[in-house]
Each structure stands twice: as structure tokens, then as C-alpha cells.
Amino acid sequence: MKFTIGILMVGILLFLPAGTFYYWNAWLFIGLLFIPMLVLGLILWIKAPDLLAKRLNSKEKETEQKHVIVLSLFIFVGGFIVSALDFRFEWSNLPMWVIVVASIVLLISYILYGEVMRENAYLSRTVEIQENQKVIDTGLYGIVRHPMYFVTTTLFLSFPIVLGSAIGFLIFLFYPVLLVKRIKNEEMILENGLEGYKEYKERVKYRLIPFIW
């Protein structure tokens, strides 16, 4: 149901403001987004149904995280609508090679998304401490403390470029800013409730971007 509703909502947010179904960037984006999503969902359904259930649960308990989710929703809705309007009124004129590169970045980000979930079976969509949860410090978690947020940043920033909109990209740039707020709150919760997380922070210095932050 969520998968189907997701396709319908994205379609409405893109084709309605574009004023046409001949928005080829939108069809490219929908294919690049939802085909890997379906494949990954089926793999999780077969091999890791508990992890899939955690990823489908979006009911945040932390008030600060709820605010982040609401603001993120505004960014996504606004970014999609502006990108579609950009196509309709031809505000941007991105070259084809830029769109191709963004499409490759989107696919690579999805592959890394799956790798992060393979490494961390505790990867809930909400900020919480789970029963018997342990600190994961291998693979991508040995490079940055929040590889999923790094991956979603590259993933989401590729969206408006695939859609052919430089203006939409400017709107999506607010997403990493929100992530800073989410990460700081999440780390406070993990440090207070997850054994070994303080030591992990000492071993892995960077939260989101290697050598920067």
C-alpha cells in the first residue's frame, strides 16, 4: 500500500504542476526510484522481514524528530512541485550529461542504501534504542557514524537534478541542514541509552561527511 501510494503521490506532485504526462525526466525519475525500491523491498521481505517492518514504521516518538519529519515533508513536496514547474516554464536548462551523472549517483546511492541495511539489522526509520541493540562499527560505519544519512543526502540531492531542475536542487539543499538537527538529537539519545556508543564516537570522528563533519 505504501509503495503504491508513493508512486501515485509522486506522480501527482510531478505531472500535475508540469501540466503534461510528457515530462520525460519525471518518468526517468520514477523508474530510477521505484524499481530499485521494489527490488530492495522484496529482498527484505524474503530475507529480513523484521528490518523491513522497522523501515516502514515512520511514527517518531521524539518531539524534535517529529518536527524534522514535518519540515522534510515540506521540502520534498515543495522541491517536486518547483521541479515540475521548472520543466513547464523552462526556467532551467541542464545539459543531458548532468542528468545522466545524477541518475548514476541516484543508483549508486541506492546500492549503498542496501549495503547499510545489510550491515545494521537495528536500522529503524525512527530514533529509538532497541532491545539488545549493539553498536555497529564495521563497513561504512567505520568511516562515518551515520552512513544512512550520508547515503540519503546524496540520494535526495540527485532527485531534482534527474528531474532537470537547478531551482529544485536549491530547495532540496535544506535537507542536509535538517539532518544536522536530527543527528545531534539522535546522538544524544544513543549516547545516553546505547552501551558503547561513547567509545564508538571516539573511534569514528565524523558524523556525516568524512574529514568535514
Image: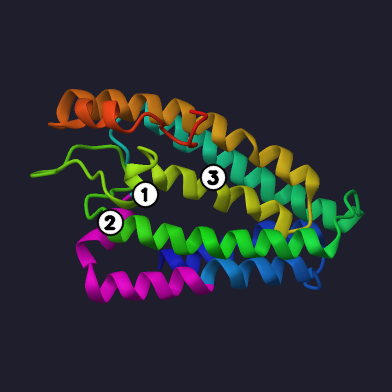
Q: Secondary structure at mark 2?
A: helix
Residue for point 65% across, 37% down: 173
Figure disc tally: 3
Q: On the rendered structure, is 85 left or right of 142?
A: right
Q: How far is disc 2 from disc 3 in space, using C-alphas?
A: 19 Å
**Toward which corner of the image does residue 12 lie, by quadrant?**
bottom right
Q: Is residue 42 magenta?
A: yes
Amino acid bearing label 3: Thr
Q: How far is disc 1 from disc 3 in space, using C-alphas?
A: 15 Å
Residue for point 16% across, 32% down: 194
Q: Which residue is mark 3?
A: 153
Residue for point 57% across, 37% down: 175
Q: Earlier in the sequence, mark 1 or mark 3?
A: 1
Q: Which residue is mark 1?
A: 140
Q: Is residue 56 visible?
A: no
Q: Which residues are magenta?
A: 35-57
Amino acid bearing label 2: Glu
Contact (Cβ within 8 Å) of mark 1 with mark 3: no
Crowdedness of circle 1 by 10 Å Cα count: few (<14), some, many (20+)? some
Viewer-nearest of discs 2 and 3: 2
Viewer-nearest of discs 2 and 1: 1
Q: Which residue is mark 2?
A: 119
Q: Earlier in the sequence, mark 2 or mark 3?
A: 2
Q: Main secondary structure of the magenta part?
A: helix
Q: Nearer the viewer, residue 204 or 7?
A: 204
Q: Secondary structure at mark 1?
A: helix
